[in-house]
Amino acid sequence: MVAEGQDQAAALERQNRELQRLLTVARDQLGEMKVKLAEASAPPQSFATFVKWAGEFADIVSSGRRMRVTVLPSLGRELEPGDEVLLNAMMVVVGTAEPERAGQAALVREVIDADRVLVVSRGEDERVVIMIGGDAHSRVSEGDTVIIDPRTGFASEKVDRSGVEALMLEEVPDVDYRAIGGLAPQIERIRDAIELPIRHPELYIEHDLRPPRGLLLYGPPGCGKTLIAKAVAHSLGEAVGADRSYFLSVKGPELLNKYVGETERYIRTIFERARSKASTGAPVVVFFDEMDALFRSRGSGVSSDMETTIVPQLLTELDGVEGLSNVIVIGASNREDMIDPAILRPGRLDVKIEVSRPGPASASDIFSKYLTASVPMAPSELAQHGDDAVGTARALTAVAVDTLFGYPDTPEYVSGALIRNIVDRAKTGAIKSLISGGERGITATHLRDACEQELLEARAVAAGTLGGE
Ligand SMILES: Nc1ncnc2c1ncn2[C@@H]1O[C@H](COP(=O)(O)OP(=O)(O)OP(=O)(O)O)[C@@H](O)[C@H]1O
Ligand SMILES: [Mg+2]
């Protein structure tokens, strides 16, 4: 009896515990559901940007409105200017949010101080924005693109625009004037026009003489225009004793194709970049290759109407380049007749230099740059000149020039590039002779063959029967 009663009590006890467990589960589930219900029906939180602390309050900008609000004490005082925060319906800062990664792109005009930069974005006036995180001087410079939030006036990050960077090669050219053959008079004129004012600014000021802002190199392909532009940049670096010089090179057609409708903005960017580099004291050459593609005469009807806006943009920039400012603009073109004349007027690219095809004397000078005494020459050739390498190189050069100019149509095709190709081809010939068991070194025959082959190719290119440009 007693045992039975005990069994019953134990069973009841078990039942009781089970009920208790179920109750607890039910209560937990109810709690969870309550939370979910609360979450689901919670009023939306809005995003805002933290601007600064105002005592225990926070100044924020939300949807373009500036407000002073309270901050949930649990958030502490960690907020930094520019942080994204969450506001509840009572306009209390209740949390932080991921920073905004999208925004409007703006171009940096000037870094004002550690946390403020002057920017301009499309179609708008200049404005000052705050660089989130400060340290603006080391993070951005003139010509960079940053993301701004136009409503809050914060700039978040710099965007790398590989496009324009790639268009503007900034390498320091290692070409110097000595590598250029047959253009001594042109080089002298260029040095007078560009290096004199930079070397002796005080004399220009005293004589009230305004130095040219730039020059135009024109002439047929492959005759040394790009080479000269690079040598100018190289030699300017030496002239001002700067550690380095900059060569911002822009190819006209590339700029047009890549940035349809945005070309003006890129021209502005290029000059902004140039000025910012020049402000460090380093000379900057801005080189517009194939300039005719960009700056065709307005109203020539050759391309679309883009030249009606691009030309004035370049004029503005050219006029904005101060004399004696270390920024030199060089344009190169095969079709100078196509370039808008306003660009070539005094005070702009007013030094015009023709880089023409070489005659025999110039060709000989160009050959001497590539066919030097250090090129392996055949013993049979050396023997004819008392084993004197310099004399032999000179004699081989004379052979090459005679061969080259022995054809009546040579003046139509000859160029520095062609001459370089001839020497390269003769060297290839020498290597092949050596491999097939012949004599080591270049011979007159290698050079003659190379001249003939190169001329044949040049004629074929001109006639359009060979690949061609
Ligand atoms: N006067 C020269 N002296 C030495 N090398 C030259 C000369 N002219 C051309 N060359 C050689 O030919 C190459 C092409 O020359 P460059 O690029 O300067 O021609 P360009 O006048 O700019 O032609 P393009 O109108 O096609 O741009 C040079 O890299 C160089 O190797
Ligand atoms: Mg060129």
Image (cartoon, helix red, strand yellow):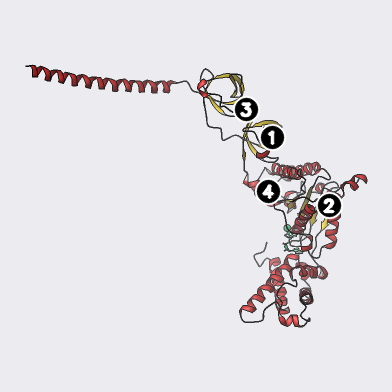
The quadrant holding residue 277 is top right
Q: Residues within 10 Å of mark 4 (few under 14, many from 20)?
A: some
Q: Residue at x 79, y 51 (%)?
A: 241
The answer to which of 300 and 372 lies nearer the viewer is 372
Residue 370 in the figure: left or right of residue 322: left
> How far is disc 1 from disc 4 in space, using C-alphas?
25 Å
Question: Which residue position holds label 3?
Answer: 152
Q: Residues within 10 Å of mark 2 (few under 14, many from 20)?
A: many
- The amino acid marked with disc number 1 is Val
N-term-proximal mark, 2 vs 4 = 2
Residue 350 in the figure: left or right of residue 463: right
Answer yes or no: disc 2 within 8 Å of ligand 1: no
- The amino acid marked with disc number 3 is Thr
N-term-proximal mark, 3 vs 2 = 3
- The amino acid marked with disc number 2 is Ile
Q: Which mark is residue 194?
A: 2
> How far is disc 4 from disc 3 in space, using C-alphas?
34 Å
Question: Which residue position holds label 4?
Answer: 256
- The amino acid marked with disc number 4 is Leu
Q: Nearer the viewer, mark 4 or mark 3?
A: 3
The answer to which of 19 and 7 lies nearer the viewer is 7
Please, what secondary structure does the residue beneath circle 4 have?
Answer: helix
Would you say the residues marked 3 and 2 are in contact, meaning their CB atoms lie under 8 Å apart?
A: no
Question: Which residue position holds label 1?
Answer: 119
> How far is disc 1 from disc 2 in space, using C-alphas?
32 Å
